[in-house]
Image: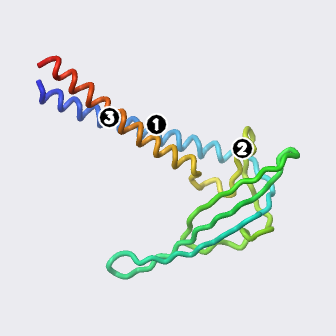
Amino acid sequence: MSGLVFVFTLLAIFGLLIGEIIVYIKLRKRYFSQRSTWISTIGKVTYAKHKHYEEETGGDNCKPEEWTVWVDYSYDVAGKHYTASQDWSSSSPPVQQYSVGSAVTVYYNPIRPKKGVLNRGIIPDEMWWGAWVFIAVVIVTMALLVFVLIFLATLFE
């Protein structure tokens, strides 16, 4: 009986993981497809910082380059002023359009105009937090499932 419970536990955990991964991927796709319908407006860069990194990786002493870009910007929607910021990494140097005072295209959520981005394809911070919450939910769910199955196994022995 305990062998059957063990197999069932493994199958249940595997199925749960696959199901939760599919849900997360679908939610992420939905989030980015909604971003593609955001409205654009012209904003202004209020702060910009570019940092260049070189790191040695691998045995062949390759040095990949990476640029990190931080940009704060402001924009107006229906007479209301908003500020936002976005940061991202790139393997190529940042373009000059992100210098302080320059005009930029800001894409904003028509339902919540305070949500404005310069690049709709960059994963926002709230998505990373969502990923960590997702991982925590998976771990807690698996632990509860194992606990319940062990408890059930002791009842039937």
Instruction: State the image coordinates of residue 131 (x, y, percent, origin top left).
Output: 47, 45
Q: Which mark is on residue 23? A: 1
Instruction: State the image coordinates of residue 133 (x, y, percent, origin top left).
Output: 47, 41
Q: Which mark is on residue 142? A: 3
Q: Of helix, strand and loop, which one carries label 1?
A: helix
Whichever of labels 2 and 1 marks the residue nearer the N terminus, that label is 1
Q: How is the image coloured?
A: rainbow
> What residue sits 41% from the left and 43% below the top?
135
> What residue sits 53% from the left and 43% below the top?
28
Q: Residue furthest top?
A: 156
Real-space Cα separation, disc 2 to disc 1, in angstroms: 23 Å
Give the residue type at disc 2: Asn
Q: Of helix, strand and loop, which one carries label 3?
A: helix
Classed neighbour count for the residue bearing mark 3: other residues with Cα under 10 Å, few (<14), some (14–19), many (≥20): some
Q: Is residue 131 left or right of residue 17?
A: right
Q: Residue furthest right?
A: 79
Q: Of helix, strand and loop, which one carries label 2?
A: loop
Quick one: 154 or 10, which is closer to the camera? 154
Q: Nearer the viewer, mark 2 or mark 3?
A: 3
Query: Which residue is disc 2 drawn over?
Result: 109
Whichever of labels 2 and 3 marks the residue nearer the N terminus, that label is 2
Q: Quadrant of residue 151?
A: top left
> Is residue 31 positioned above or below 43 on the image?
above
Give the residue type at disc 1: Val
Instruction: State the image coordinates of residue 83 (x, y, percent, origin top left).
Output: 76, 53
Classed neighbour count for the residue bearing mark 2: other residues with Cα under 10 Å, few (<14), some (14–19), many (≥20): some
Real-space Cα separation, disc 2 to disc 3, in angstroms: 36 Å
- Whether pointer 2 and pointer 3 mark residues with C-beta atoms closer than 8 Å, the reply is no
